[in-house]
């Protein structure tokens, strides 16, 4: 797989709590140079990035990373992020509702956030490291019924990240319109290629550009 093809599927990510403005600017410049799918950044930086990097696709996170904010808070976060200039929203599912098998509430929350997003892309983070197979399947069904655009494996802040087994489970249980994003612990070129070959449309990674830029710079 050519490095340009891989990078075009990468959400170039920096969500560390101590990320400085200089760090974010560096991330955005790399995304522009290497043509990543987007930058995924903290909500507090969205407005400044939109002003400085007008054409860049901006992804941000809500209910992050624990997911247990109330529905109304997530809707408000999503609306503000879009007003600030976000193109894509990655929301953490209410993991407590999933663990309590309150799947109708899970679906209702996703639907409410998607309505707030309108035509913008909504990715729903399942945080699979905390879920049983039954619960992962239920999240797939809720994401599909609620009309979200993507299901995403992980925040990168949980006890583990993306696995091929979870991606395969997603493929079996999501609807045909739902895409898959793998994130968390993807740190080699081989892993990037593997997740993409398994049907992921996006990969969230902080190190993809670092891994691939020597090859990209030679092209």
Image (cartoon, rainbow, N blue to C red):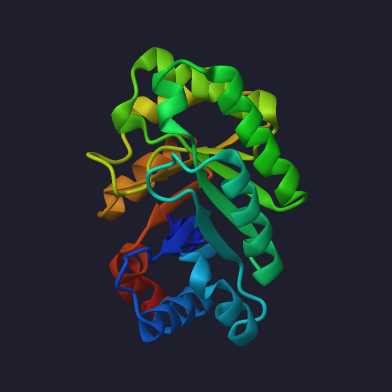
Which of the 4 quarters of the picture holds residue 189?
A: bottom left
Give how far across and how far down residue 50 sits, in percent. 62, 78
Towards the viewer: 107 or 208: 107
Residue 174 visible in image: no
Give the quadrant of the C terminus. bottom left
Q: Give the residue drawn at x 59%, y 56%.
A: 77
Is 144 rendered above or below residue 1?
above
Give how far across and how far down residue 137 sits, in percent. 47, 17
Residue 50 visible in image: yes
Q: Give the residue drawn at x 59%, y 24%.
A: 105
Q: Give the residue drawn at x 46%, y 57%.
A: 10
Is 130 rendered above or below residue 71?
above
Q: Give the residue drawn at x 66%, y 81%.
A: 54
Is 36 rendered above or below residue 50?
above
Relative horizontal placement of residue 16, taking residue 44 as reference (left or right): left
Relative horizontal placement of residue 102, taking residue 3 as reference (left or right): right
Towards the viewer: 213 or 60: 60
Pick out the residue farthest to the left: 159
Pick out the residue farthest to the top: 134
Relative horizontal placement of residue 48, taking residue 147 as reference (left or right): left
Give how far across and how far down residue 199 sits, in percent. 49, 35
Is 199 rendered above or below residue 155?
above
Relative horizontal placement of residue 24, taking residue 150 as reference (left or right): left
Give how far across and how far down residue 45 sits, in percent. 51, 74
């Amino acid at each position: 797989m050519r490095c340009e093809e891989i990078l075009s599927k990468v959400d170039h990510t920096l969500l560390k709590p101590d990320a400085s403005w200089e760090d974010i600017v560096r991330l955005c410049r790399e995304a522009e140079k290497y043509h990543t799918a987007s930058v995924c950044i903290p909500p507090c930086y969205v407005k400044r990035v939109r002003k400085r990097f007008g054409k860049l696709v901006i992804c941000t996170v809500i209910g992050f990373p624990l997911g247990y904010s109330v529905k109304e808070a997530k809707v408000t976060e999503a609306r503000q992020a879009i007003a600030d200039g976000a193109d894509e929203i990655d929301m953490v599912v209410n993991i407590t509702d999933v663990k309590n098998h309150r799947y109708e509430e899970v679906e209702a929350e996703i639907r409410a956030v998607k309505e707030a997003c309108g035509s913008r892309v909504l990715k729903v983070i399942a945080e699979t490291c905390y879920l049983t197979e039954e619960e992962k399947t239920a999240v797939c069904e809720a994401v599909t019924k609620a009309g979200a655009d993507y299901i995403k494996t992980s925040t990168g802040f949980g006890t583990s990240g993306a696995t091929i087994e979870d991606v395969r489970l997603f493929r079996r249980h999501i609807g045909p319109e739902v895409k898959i994003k793998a994130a968390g612990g993807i740190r080699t070129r081989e892993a990037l290629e593997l997740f993409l070959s398994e049907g992921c449309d996006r990969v969230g990674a902080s190190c993809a550009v670092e891994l691939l830029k020597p090859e990209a710079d030679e092209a």
